[in-house]
Amino acid sequence: MSILENITSSKDAIALEDKHGAHNYHPLPVVLSRGEGVYVCDVEGKKYYDFLSAYSAVNQGHCHPKIVNAMTDQAKTLTLTSRAFYNDMLGKYEKYATETFHFDKLLPMNTGAEAVETALKICRKWAYEEKGIAENNAEIIVCENNFHGRTTTIISFSNDPVARKNFGPYTDGFIKIAYDNLEALEEVLRSNDNIAGFLVEPIQGEAGVYVPSEGYLSGAKALCEKYNVLFIADEVQTGIARTGRLLATCGNCSCSDKHCSGTPEIKPDILILGKALSGGAYPVSAVLANDNIMGVIRPGNHGSTFGGNPIAAAVGMAALEVVKNEELANNAFELGELFRSELNKFIPTTNLVNSVRGKGLLNAILINDSEESSTAWDICMALKENGLLAKPTHGNIIRFAPPLVMTKEQLLDCVAIIIKTLQEFKK
């Protein structure tokens, strides 16, 4: 087969990946070749609703013309300089993003995992140079069932055996506590003077869209302030309007456009962003903090050849403009309320689904079966046949996260597909 020859069947495309690619994913057996807005099409031409959005990277919809045009226009003039030189796009992007999220400084990277690693380094350096912790003694609190990426450092504080097994030795310096448990957090803070930071997902997405109790995040931030510990919010998946606010840490703010992040419920000391920061068009991530924290980073401490490149800067600005101009946070809030309301009408009529949970357009249904069962996977296969793509997480949970450009009519159509599939499904 010539490398220029088109793939015309899903079977051929899957066989090609299986033969030549590492088997580090278990995809749903659908081969996508086109996307537009809330839809994707496979190589045979079948059209589907995308209810995963590339794990919330495609919040602005597939191939949004404003983002694609920004990327292609910039690619025609300058793609990469490295940070050995200035370029004429990075400063504009840094200004736009820091003003959008209300921080002094932005450190640009490429992927979510890189951004998490960056935040950990900043936190530790701050602890030694500003808090006065003895060098190499700083510890960072994390939560059980977290997902922050798959680098060797990050899996060191994961409790997912699939992610961890046979990748040791692991990195020290992390203390795991129960999520959504302020008592556990304060117990560690009170008993350990070497705590530098608390790294947390405002909603645990990979764990099955676990939304913490009301007041948990604000209580955790207050404890961090009390003990002079940095509150680090990993909003790679929850940020950029996904949960019905610009950031999940905005909480139940009263901002009319839900897009300002100026008066949030919780203001993280360090904010980690990725995924939808580019609308899924290009790898773009960022760490934001104020000068008193970001100031510990000096030339040579951290960097990336591609981080802050001109294309990433152009794409990042365009992606954020789309979220603001199209009021996607408002749309996610309203459609999320509708989605959960409609499913909650259906759930009492079936013994297949225990509950629906989520915030904005980050939702999940809990299937009434064990994590080891294939039920959730089989339901996703049935949903695929009915024209909707979703994936299970943790065995018995199905995550639903469509692009935020979805209309009310489209959402109700998707709800009808989900309910029809569940009604027809037989174990």
Image (cartoon, rainbow, N blue to C red):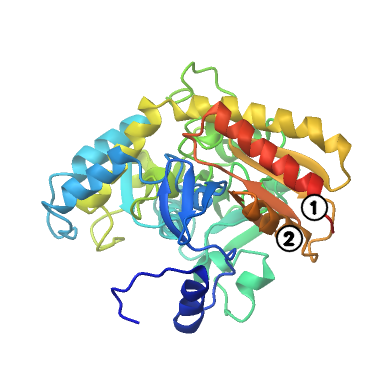
As drawn, is 427 to the left or to the right of 94? right
Q: Residue at 76% x, 56% y: name it.
A: 396
Instruction: Examine the rendering and report whether any part of residue 160 can be seen.
Output: yes
Q: Looking at the picture, how far across and down is residue 265, in whole percent?
A: 56, 27
Q: Nearer the viewer, mark 2 or mark 1?
A: 1
Q: Secondary structure at mark 2?
A: helix
At 30% from the left edge and 80% from the top edge, which residue is drawn? Answer: 2
Q: Amino acid at mark 1?
A: Phe
Determine the residue positioned at 51% across, 34% down: 406
Mark 1 burial class by Cα count in 10 Å: few <14, some 14-19, many 20+? some
Percent from the top left, x then y, of residue 158?
63, 64
Q: Is residue 31 above or below residue 234?
A: below
Q: Are marks 2 and 1 in contact (CB under 8 Å)?
A: yes
334 vs 305: above or below: above
* The label number, if any, that marks residue 425 in the structure image: 1
Q: Which mark is residue 319?
A: none
Residue 23 appears left or right of 356 = left
- Residue 405 image offset from top left, x and y in percent: 46, 34
Residue 211 in view, yes or no: no
Q: Secondary structure at mark 1?
A: loop
Mark 2 or 1 closer to N-term?
2
The residue positioned 37% from the left and 48% from the top of the image is 286
Instruction: Please name the amino acid that badge 2 sits on.
Output: Asp
Q: For the image shown, how many numbered marks are present on the structure?
A: 2
- Give the residue number, with chain letter if any, for mark 2: 378
* Residue 408 sits in quarter: top right
Q: Give the quadrant of the N terminus.
A: bottom left
Q: Nearer the viewer, residue 126 or 306?
A: 306
Relative to 115, say whether 173 is above or below.
below
Give the Cα distance between marks 2 and 1: 9 Å
